[in-house]
Image: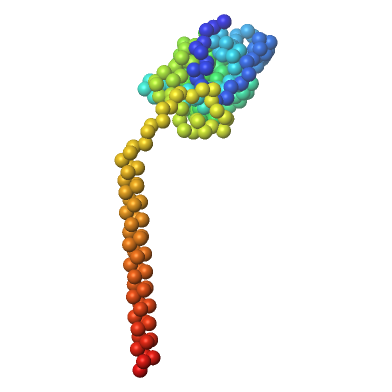
Amino acid sequence: MTKLRNLRELLWRRKGPPLPASVLEAAKLKIDPDSTGKWILPAAYRAFLSNMDGGRPGVRDFTHKGTTFEIEAFYTFADAAQTAERLRKASRLPEGYLPVAVAEGNRPLVFVELNEKGKVWIRTNHRAAWTDKKAVMSLAKNFSDFLDMLGSNNSSTLSTNMIASPWGPIASRPSLRRRAPDPKPVEEKKATKKATTKKKATKKKATKKATTKKATTKKATTKKATTK
């Protein structure tokens, strides 16, 4: 079997079940309905499916020619075959290619050739024709090498929206050291609170004094009027 990288390193948020050999054999009918024997699942991609039928990785970025791309998910084989058929009917994909990974917005991004080696391609613009060499480029010599590219630019730390993903917790997370709070803002906050409290107390005392003085003046005026 083709050796793949340790898939746990991709910190899956969700992954499909392994596909048994019988299902992978039946997959030939999806990619080669006329049984010509011309199209087959690449060895490395087949090995991937035998581990998991697609999924959503936590480590999902890769760089190609200075540009970083992000994978939203790897297709299940059934979805990949269905998407390929739809694209071919729309004349957006030639025979002999299978979409295997999708970018955000449900746009097919990564494709493999349906032969033993399984060269990997990228289409950077989903509207581009397959013959557009500026948008459709070779990415890796096989699917195994493509998996090795994920997270290789060291910017694969999980973003906030990944951690709060509706798909549930990921398999593992990088250790995060909680930083101690900066004592300066805490002291400033205490001093501000103390000054505000003192100011309120002084104002309250002044109001009470003014009220007492007013009451005394009123009482004296009333007494003077009574004496008259």
Q: Nearer the viewer, residue 81 or 205?
A: 205
Image coordinates for residue 25, horizontal then vertical, percent: 66, 10
Using the rendered view, name the quadrant where residue 149 is placed: top left
Look at the image and tell me whether residue 198 can be seen. Answer: yes
> Left of 157 or right of it: where is 97?
right
> Left of 223 or right of it: where is 55?
right
Vertical arrangement, residue 147 with respect to residue 225, above or below: above
Q: Most extreme residue toward the bottom, as rendered?
A: 228
Q: For the N terminus, give its image quadrant.
A: top right
Image coordinates for residue 226, horizontal then vertical, percent: 38, 91
Q: Nearer the viewer, residue 127 or 3?
A: 3
Count of marks overlaid on the render: 0
Vertical arrangement, residue 195 with respect to residue 219, above or below: above
Using the rendered view, name the quadrant where residue 38 is placed: top right
Residue drawn 37% across and 73% down?
A: 211
Q: For the C terminus, give its image quadrant.
A: bottom left
Vertical arrangement, residue 148 with respect to residue 225, above or below: above
Q: Most extreme residue toward the front, as rendered?
A: 227
Q: Nearer the viewer, residue 33 or 161?
A: 161
Residue drawn 52% across and 7% down?
A: 3
Q: Most extreme residue toward the top, as rendered?
A: 1
Residue drawn 54% across and 30% down?
A: 106
Residue drawn 60% across and 24% down?
A: 83
Q: What colouring method underlies this structural image?
A: rainbow
Look at the image and tell me whether residue 131 can be seen. Answer: no
Image coordinates for residue 186, horizontal then vertical, percent: 35, 42
Vertical arrangement, residue 210 with respect to residue 186, above or below: below
Using the rendered view, name the quadrant where residue 46 is placed: top right
Image coordinates for residue 8, horizontal then vertical, percent: 52, 17
